[in-house]
Amino acid sequence: MTLFDHQALALRFVAALRSGDIATLRTVFTEDCVTEWPQSGERVRSLADFAAILDNYPGGPAGRQQELETLRARPVDTLKLVAPTYTFVAVEGGGNTGTITVKGRYPDGSDWWIVTLYRLRDGKIAQATNFFAPVYPAPEWRRQWVELIG
């Protein structure tokens, strides 16, 4: 696959996370995909099980509560802005392997980085390993040696 194809796949991946819709998931994952979450020691062995996890997410299906792609503000007495649960950040890929970086906001309001390493079969993800890392403030003690980037 070309880099453009990996980007199109990554954008469908994030759309699938947002919607949890099985038809969208089928455009991204093989039916027998294997997804691993090393930090929790779990392995999901099918698209059906992965879709069931998204569907049964505590507090409601993951991503479906907040589906707006963009924010538009207008003058009102009270303004409530809703942001996407998952935001595409980057993709790198070549051949049948790639990496997708996503920023996720969980129902408790915490922000996390989600990195997915994947392998393709027939243009769909057949194997994925996801790593989840919370956003945290940089410690003050090393400030003199770093540049803040976010």
Image (tube, rainbow, N blue to C red):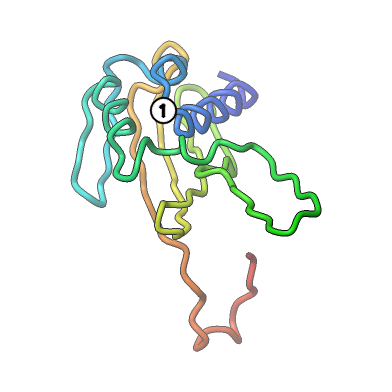
Quadrant, the N terminus: top right
Place of residue 149 in the rendered image (x, y in percent of width and height, measured from the top left): 64, 66
Quadrant housing residue 61: top left
Place of residue 119 in the rendered image (x, y in percent of width and height, measured from the top left): 39, 26
Quadrant housing residue 115: top left
**At 68% from the left edge and 58% from the top edge, which residue is drawn?**
78
Q: Nearer the viewer, residue 126 or 82?
A: 82
Quadrant housing residue 52: top left
Disc tally is 1
**At 69% from the left edge and 40% from the top edge, which residue is drawn?**
70
Q: Looking at the image, which residue sits at the far right?
A: 75
Quadrant, the C terminus: bottom right
Compared to residue 134, the image places residue 1 above or below, namely above
45 sits to left or right of 145: left
Q: Nearer the viewer, residue 35 or 77?
A: 77
Q: Looking at the image, which residue sits at the far top?
A: 122
Q: Nearer the viewer, residue 59 or 9?
A: 59
Label 1: few (<14), some (14–19) or many (≥20) C-alpha neighbours in 10 Å:
many
Compared to residue 44, the image places residue 134 above or below, namely below
Place of residue 71 in the rendered image (x, y in percent of width and height, measured from the top left): 70, 45
**At 61% from the left edge and 38% from the top edge, which residue is drawn?**
68
| Amino acid beneath label 1 | Gly
Helix, strand or loop for disc 1: loop
**At 54% from the left edge and 31% from the top edge, which residue is drawn?**
93
Q: Which residue is mark 1?
A: 20
